Image (tube, rainbow, N blue to C red):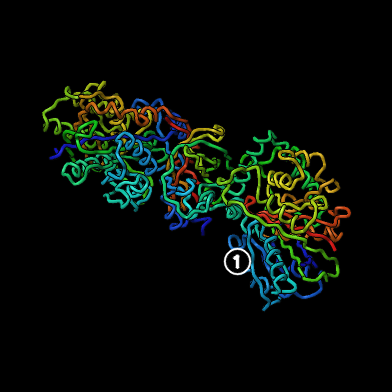
């Protein structure tokens, strides 16, 4: 058994005066203070520090600035699923006896290059660089191909895609650490600038800085709340999407989900909330369909009719998701697990889903080419 | 000059970018009245290379078209020469890229390859060299290309004509040819009528001096000497193609030599696409091959500033009918067009730049 | 670095695929692919041989890029498409010589060779396949 026993978050946003190390230290200190004890291993999650900040060796980098010189530390990367992957590695360290208490800290500092071209290049390292990136493709373009296919296959229009960001923004208003804490008007969505047709700026997660930390322990010994990691499901898909059989199905999500349910030995009905990886509106929709929350092609209705609301039958991203909480990519997976931890221990403040005991987090790297699901229950 | 072993054209192909700018629009860009220049230039519009096009990409597509007509395996090409004055790299041979893209010379790439420069006659100079290689028996097939993305300085008279396009010719043994090059001749002097200095973006020229002592003198000398050598007169030819820096000069030089305009006009393409420099006379020849009948005779005389002319006497045979339709014709490319305004033209020609432009050129 | 400057060896080693559409064909299951893999993604066979793929195909799906990555910003808007070649092999490629609003699914296209990535005024010009509507 591995438990989540402490948590610390920095607000997600544009932290002009803070660097990678300031963010990582801030979240780590908060988590360690929340837990109240020391750790014997540090696992850092990050995707872009080498590309954007010119900094690798993040294990050593973080402990050096955290005053923990000597503690073993490593970095884990799996694009957008880096944070969840770091948790997986930390759980392995604990289960194998290599460590008893592990600090998992996700950190990303994306705003040090201020041109969209630069962040687009950086994020597009998650796709096949030689045969998708070199011809001029981007991560956003791959989501656009999926969105066009989804629109064609199910006969949905642009307006149908507005329900997703509208709910995410509405949820983020109540989330203290969210980046975009304002409501979105439907007409603003319809006027949003094109990024890669039919994907617009408001279909996509923003560019974000942020750090999130959790402490994992083999005992439920956290003073402010504890949650058990019931299970992990993990699966991959081809990195290049032109080799996929279908663009509107994400078999890695299905595989990870059934594996997670089986390992936890729980029914899907006992999941109280879903914290998913919505890099784009269409990925948000397809993910909810693959998780069985909506029939294929019917996710827009789920979000339009309140089914995914915080007080609805199957709450999705009560904190606002990547779209509105923000997406400090390599840290996002840790934010998701931290948010689920706060939910199942009743500490999610304005974003709290009433009575939530069991939460699912789903993190996805690339275009759902690396999918990690955690099932977490408060104890 | 005549080779020991007879050499001919096995296949030909052209390429012209789809973008056009009207001369009127170019004049408007500089506040000029095109009507006052039209009669002196006789080019109504010119081709403009797209953002992703250059001499190599033009040479490539022209060569692919030539291979379609030649119906030979590209591995049989043992000489690939690209004549141009707008090399993508000042140092790094365009021909090597073309050899690689076509698979010339076989798996081991056993072929000669080089870029030729002789202003607008670099492409015909390449043909002369390959005639020598095949004629001597050193090789069986060679590819000669004349292609350019010509530079005309903003506001300069050349801006109305400097265009983009090219033609490729696969030469081989006469018995496999669609047209036989019966004889050729070159005439060269040091006549500084037009040049581009190292590191300069645009060429300089000497206006009226580019006419009589340069263009007319060299073309007329080469044409007369060649006809004298083989004993022909203008009446013996069905078509005459001269280098075409504008729409006016070829008609004038042809008339002075004794050719009637109806023999010159089928190969006069510059009025529709501008002057493709190293491609100029060779695109004209391609337009004639697109329609020539077996047995017809063609005189081609190129001109390159600096200066010199290559003259060729070509006789078409009946194999031409088999291959003519195997690739797009000159007029297919001439008629495939979309217009740009001066702002887009300036962007495509990289006359205006972005801040932090890492995709330069 | 890579975002600003195309690696020369990294482009050079892909020239057979980028200039000539050289891909791979699994000798056991017949699956064709570009780039050529050492291991067949379909059946796991290690017997994959080089093959020149057909130069014509049609557009399966496409997007118009307005927000380009570094090194491509001068070319916007441009179209990125999934192309299915005549033999069924799929690849991602840029379309050229076409107005983005004229692109349609099922549009017949042919391979051309164009400048794809240019590293400033002094660096490498990386040429590669692009696809354009059939001329004829």
- Asked whether C96 or A157 is in front, the reply is A157
What secondary structure is marked by label 1? loop
Residue C84 point in image, percent of width and height: 51, 39
Is A230 placed above or below B106 here? below
Between A313 and C114, the one lying in front of the other is: A313
Mark 1 highlights which residue?
A55
Left or right side of B9 for C59:
right
Residue B135 pos. (x, y %): 17, 41
Is residue B264 placed above or below A239 in the rendered structure? above
Q: Quadrant of residue A216?
A: bottom right
Instruction: Give the quarter of the image for residue A24.
Output: bottom right
Q: Position of residue B152 (x, y in %)?
A: 38, 39
Mark 1 closeness class: few <14, some 14–19, many ≥20 residues within 10 Å: few
Residue B157 seen anywhere in this rendered image of the structure: no
Q: Is residue A91 visible?
A: yes
Residue C91 image offset from top left, x and y in percent = 51, 44
Residue drawn at (37%, 36%) of the image: B165
Q: Residue furthest bottom?
A: A70
The chain that hosts pointer 1 is A
């Amino acid at each position: 058994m591995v438990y989540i026993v402490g948590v610390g978050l920095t607000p997600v946003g544009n932290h002009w005066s803070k660097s990678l190390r300031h963010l990582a230290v801030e979240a780590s200190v908060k988590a360690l203070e929340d837990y109240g004890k020391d750790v014997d291993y540090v696992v850092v999650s990050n995707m872009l520090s080498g590309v954007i900040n010119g900094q690798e060796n993040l294990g050593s980098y973080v402990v050096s600035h955290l005053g923990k010189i000597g503690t073993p530390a490593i970095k884990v990367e799996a694009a957008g699923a880096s944070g969840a992957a770091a948790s997986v590695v930390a759980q392995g360290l604990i289960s194998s006896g290599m460590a008893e208490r592990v600090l998992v800290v996700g950190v990303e500092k994306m705003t040090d290059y201020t041109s969209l071209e630069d962040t687009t290049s950086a994020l597009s390292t998650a796709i096949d660089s030689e045969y998708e990136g070199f011809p001029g493709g981007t991560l956003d373009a791959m989501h656009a191909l999926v969105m066009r296919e989804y629109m064609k296959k199910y006969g949905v229009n642009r307006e149908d895609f507005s329900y997703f960001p509208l709910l995410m923004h509405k949820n983020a208003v109540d989330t203290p650490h969210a980046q975009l804490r304002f409501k979105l008007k439907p007409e603003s969505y319809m006027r949003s600038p094109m990024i890669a047709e039919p994907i617009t700026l408001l279909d996509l997660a923003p560019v974000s800085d942020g750090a999130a930390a959790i402490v994992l322990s083999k005992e439920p010994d956290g003073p402010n709340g504890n949650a058990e990691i019931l299970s992990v499901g993990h699966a991959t898909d081809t990195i290049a999407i032109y080799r996929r059989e279908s663009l509107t199905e994400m078999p890695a999500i299905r595989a990870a989900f059934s594996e997670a349910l089986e390992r936890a030995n729980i029914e899907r009905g006992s999941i109280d909330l879903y914290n998913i990886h919505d890099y784009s509106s269409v990925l948000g929709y397809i993910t909810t369909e693959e998780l069985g929350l909506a029939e294929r092609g019917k996710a827009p209705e789920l979000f339009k009719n309140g089914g995914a609301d915080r007080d609805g039958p199957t709450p999705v991203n009560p904190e606002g998701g990547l779209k509105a909480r923000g997406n400090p990519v390599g840290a996002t997976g840790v934010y998701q697990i931290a948010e689920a931890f706060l939910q199942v221990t009743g500490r999610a403040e304005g974003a709290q889903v009433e009575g939530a005991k069991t939460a699912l987090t789903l993190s996805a790297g690339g275009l759902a080419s690396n999918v990690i699901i955690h099932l977490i229950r408060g104890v | 000059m005549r080779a020991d072993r007879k050499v001919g054209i096995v296949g030909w192909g052209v390429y012209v970018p789809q973008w056009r700018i009207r001369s009127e629009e170019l004049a408007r860009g500089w506040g000029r009245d095109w009507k006052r220049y039209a009669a002196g230039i006789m080019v109504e519009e010119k081709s403009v290379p797209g953002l992703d096009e250059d001499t190599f990409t033009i040479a490539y597509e022209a060569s692919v078209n030539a291979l379609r007509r030649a119906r030979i395996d590209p591995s049989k090409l043992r000489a690939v020469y690209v004549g141009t004055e707008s090399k993508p790299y000042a140092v790094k041979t365009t021909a090597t890229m073309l050899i690689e893209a076509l698979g010339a010379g076989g798996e081991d790439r056993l072929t000669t390859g080089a870029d030729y420069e002789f202003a607008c006659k670099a492409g015909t100079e390449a043909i002369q060299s390959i005639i020598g290689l095949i004629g001597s028996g050193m090789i069986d097939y060679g590819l000669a290309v004349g292609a350019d993305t010509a530079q005309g300085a903003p506001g300069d008279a050349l801006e109305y004509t400097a265009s983009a396009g090219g033609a490729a010719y696969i030469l081989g043994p006469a018995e496999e040819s669609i047209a036989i090059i019966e004889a050729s001749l070159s005439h060269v002097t040091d006549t500084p009528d037009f040049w581009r200095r190292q590191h300069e973006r645009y060429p300089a020229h000497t206006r009226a001096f580019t006419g009589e002592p340069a263009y007319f003198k060299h073309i007329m000398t080469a044409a007369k000497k060649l006809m004298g050598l083989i004993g022909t007169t203008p009446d013996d030819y069905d078509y005459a193609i001269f280098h075409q820096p504008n729409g006016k000069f070829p008609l004038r030089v042809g008339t002075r030599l004794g050719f009637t305009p109806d023999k010159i006009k089928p190969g006069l393409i510059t009025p529709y696409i501008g002057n493709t420099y190293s491609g100029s006379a060779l695109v004209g020849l391609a337009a004639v091959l697109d329609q020539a009948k077996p047995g017809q005779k063609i005189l081609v005389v190129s001109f390159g500033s600096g200066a010199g002319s290559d003259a060729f006497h070509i006789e078409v045979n009946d194999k031409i009918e088999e291959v003519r339709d195997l690739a797009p014709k000159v007029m297919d490319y001439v008629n495939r067009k979309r217009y740009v305004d001066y702002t887009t033209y300036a962007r495509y020609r990289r006359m205006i730049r972005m801040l932090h432009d890492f995709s330069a050129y | 670095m890579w975002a600003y400057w195309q690696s020369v060896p990294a482009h050079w080693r892909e020239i057979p695929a980028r200039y000539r559409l050289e891909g791979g064909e699994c000798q056991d299951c017949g699956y064709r692919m570009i780039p050529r893999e050492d291991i067949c993604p379909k059946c796991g066979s290690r017997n994959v041989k080089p093959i020149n793929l057909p130069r014509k195909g049609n557009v399966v799906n496409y997007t118009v890029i307005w927000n380009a990555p570094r090194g491509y910003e001068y070319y916007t808007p441009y179209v990125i498409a999934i192309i299915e070649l005549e033999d069924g092999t799929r690849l991602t490629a840029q379309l050229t010589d076409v107005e983005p609003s004229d692109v349609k699914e099922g549009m017949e296209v042919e391979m051309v060779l164009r400048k794809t990535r240019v590293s400033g005024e002094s660096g490498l010009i990386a040429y590669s396949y692009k696809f354009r509507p059939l001329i004829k």
